[in-house]
Amino acid sequence: MKIGDQMKRLLWLIPLLWCAMAHAQAYTARTDRTAQPYGTIPCPSSAGCSGGGAPTGANYLFTPPDFSTPLIRITDVKTTGSPQHAGSNTSCDAGSEVNDWNILSTRFTICGMPQHQLLYAFNPATNTATQSTSFSLAISSSAYFSYTQPYVMYHAHACPTGVAGCAEYDLGIFSYDTSCSAGIATCNPPPVLIIDLSTACGITALEGNDHAYATQGVTVSADDQTFGVPTSSTIGQGSSGNIYAIVWNRTKGCMYWNTATGQYFLNGTPVGTIDIPDTFTLHNLRLGKSGLEAKVEGTIGTCGGTCPGLQGATDKYFWTVGTGTVTYTTSNDGCGHSAIGYNLWVNKCEDQQANGLYSWTFPAPSTPTSLPAAYPSPDEGNGAHISWADDNSTDTAPFFAMFEANQFAAIDTWDNELLGVSTNGSGLVYRFAHSYATPAASPYVPGSISQDGKYLLWTTDWAGMLGNTNGTGESCTPGTNCRLDVFLALLPLKGCQ
């Protein structure tokens, strides 16, 4: 591409990026706290809830009567005979701290079940999505789009045989160019090796080991320079070898914390010991968008030191990357799922004292700011998945959450809704749509916000109606053809539509 063409392209991108940054928290959605029960459940296809087993429901655009947010059905494939909850999902590792969208909101990935990455092109002018029938990345952890390169997607996985600069079974970070000028249908970008982490980090347990893998995928900093990868030498999240909290920078190289010994390293050389006595196996690692902090979660029950012992599945630590400085939260309000931004982390927690939404700083992770004062639903637990891919450098963009109540029928405010939670001090929670997911599907309903804040992907079983044959009720057979599909909400963003 000529330099002049590149400049024209960059100039064309500037108003789009400015629009996203300037209006990231200006939504026209409702912000009241009046309970919104389900109305008539709309079948998400002109041919009924299941589409009759054919893909007639895909790209079906409709607006349910209970909210004004247009929704699009992205997937629609009959899966009779497949396991329960087969189909498609927004995340291959059941989390929402991913970046499924490219800068232009013209590419996104989802997870086909069993886990494999699928690539889609999205046309914002027509609100239609088209799947690449050629690309299928059969690796369980999620992919991650760049925040600076319009079409580049990243993934961490074992190097196959024949990759120059990476021995077989070493763990590598790869990039994929999804621009695909020939069209999305035949788009099958080859993996391009960025770095052999096993060698760069000098971790012999990850070299040539066919059990080594990235347990929850790669996360990338906003400047595209730093990559975070939770890594294990043994199969299974939280297994005995899941102890390598790796952060690799294009200039500085590999920095990692061995959570079983407390030592931290630079390019294979030990530097020192972190300043807390805890040792544990990893649940996950998520890099902050600044690239300077990483949220490292340890699995309770395997801790060998004085772990905080929070309610919920994991303890949360915040590592100033490449140093021995680690802080952690001791507050009961620090439980539940969370997401990391530039300078803050946010979470949804229900403990004995309160049921709320919170933000915290890394230096003081035990002192929360309430986001609003309380969560309205009395029966909502800690399972809200949070997506914050649209966060800005001042941490004032809303984060997005998919809250699931203990019953399908909505009773209390925010039950089973798609929500945007303000972090700018306004106290507003934007209510976009019902999620239509039953409690049984709660572990499988993560979502993903686009970088410009315009689109939200989420997963639903649509009250058990997806996969049925008559399109009129919960007629699928549990364990056989009940399934999940991916839907897209067109968020009412002021000034940029």
Image: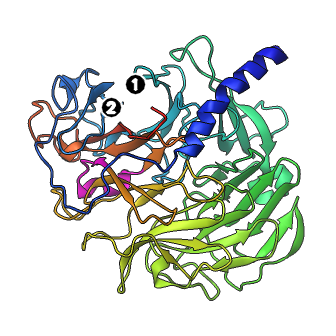
Residue nearest the viewer, comparing 381 with 481: 381
Numbered range of the magenta stretch? 432-446
Please tell me whether mark 1 sits on a helix, a strand or a loop: loop
* Quadrant in which residue 459 is drawn: top left
Percent position (x, y) of residue 308? 56, 85
The amino acid at mark 2 is Ile
Does 12 appear in magenta?
no
* Quadrant in which residue 161 is drawn: top right
In the image, residue 414 sits, relative to residue 365, either above or below, namely above
The earlier-in-sequence mark between 1 and 2 is 2
Residue beneath the point at 49% across and 34% down? 496
Residue beneath the point at 18% across and 58% down? 410
Question: Are there few (<14), some (14-19), or many (20+) residues within 10 Å of tag 2?
Answer: many
Q: Disc 1 to disc 2, how far (Cα)?
A: 8 Å
The amino acid at mark 1 is Asn
Q: Is residue 353 visible?
A: yes
Using the image, tell me which numbered label, if any, was put on residue 72.
2
Percent position (x, y) of residue 98? 55, 48
> Residue furthest toward the bottom?
306
For the N terminus, give its image quadrant.
Answer: top right
- Residue underneath mark 1: 127
Q: How many marks?
A: 2
Answer left or right for 29 relative to 38. right
Please tell me whether mark 2 sits on a helix, a strand or a loop: strand
In the image, residue 207 sits, relative to residue 301, either above or below, namely above
In the image, residue 103 sits, relative to residue 170, either above or below, namely above
Residue nearest the viewer, comparing 41 with 264: 41
For the C terminus, give its image quadrant.
Answer: top left
Evaluate if marks 1 and 2 touch, with contact meaning CB atoms under 8 Å apart. yes
Question: Are there few (<14), some (14-19), or many (20+) residues within 10 Å of tag 1?
Answer: some
> Residue furthest toward the top?
182
Q: Is residue 103 visible?
A: no
